[in-house]
Amino acid sequence: MLTTTVCVALSAAGLAIAILTAYRRRYVRATRIAAFALIPVGLAMAGLAELGGKVGRAVGDWAADLVFKPSLWAGFAVLAASVVLFAIARIAGRRKGRGAVEGKTARPGVEPGASAPAVGPGRKPAQPAPKAKQGRSDGLDDFDDIEAILKKHGI
């Protein structure tokens, strides 16, 4: 009840300011002020002002518990342990995956872990890309790379 009264008072004050601004022939500004002035009444009528109060009280209670309850700190410790375990599992998974790829004999010209290209009947497997020529400064090195990629894929 008190929240609704405060919201109505704020809206009334804002509308009064909007009327004074319109009297000075600043209509665009007066319209903006009126729009902002109607927000508190709208929040009160929709019940969102009371909801905001309940959320504020809940956050305040949680903050008080954060200071005075050791079990809440223990909860944060458990969450931290969970994050550390996830990080360890991720690092261990990366090391295991890398070691398995390094142990295999890789074909020349193929990245470790890359899948083999599909070779249909009558087609030869793609040859490794030729080495780029050294000493060319006319900007054609990029085209040589593109040409090698296209040849690799049989285009």
Image (spheres, rainbow, N blue to C red):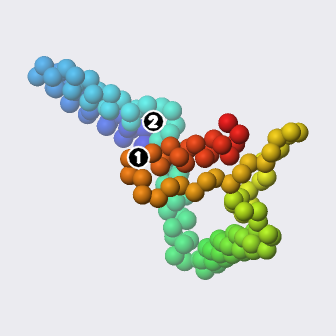
- For residue 67, side relative to residue 117 (left or right): left
- For residue 56, side relative to residue 106 (left or right): left
**Callout 1, which amino acid?**
Gly
| Residue occupying the far right of the picture | 121
Residue 43's label in the rendered image is 2
Q: Position of residue 12 (x, y in %)?
A: 29, 31
Closest to the observer, 124 or 97 = 124
Dot 1 alpha-carbon crowd within 10 angstroms: few under 14, some 14 to 19, many 20 or more: few
Q: Position of residue 7 (x, y in %)?
A: 38, 38
Closest to the observer, 106 or 134 = 134
Q: Which residue is mark 1?
A: 139
Which quadrant, please, contains the C terminus? Answer: top right
**Callout 2, which amino acid?**
Leu
Q: Residue at x 33, y 27 (%)?
A: 35
Q: Residue at x 45, y 35 (%)?
A: 43
- For residue 45, side relative to residue 12 (left or right): right
Q: Position of residue 47 (x, y in %)?
A: 52, 37
Tell me how far mark 1 sits from mark 2, CA to CA.
64 Å
Quarter location, residue 69: bottom right
Q: Residue at x 76, y 66 (%)?
A: 106
Dot 2 alpha-carbon crowd within 10 angstroms: few under 14, some 14 to 19, many 20 or more: some
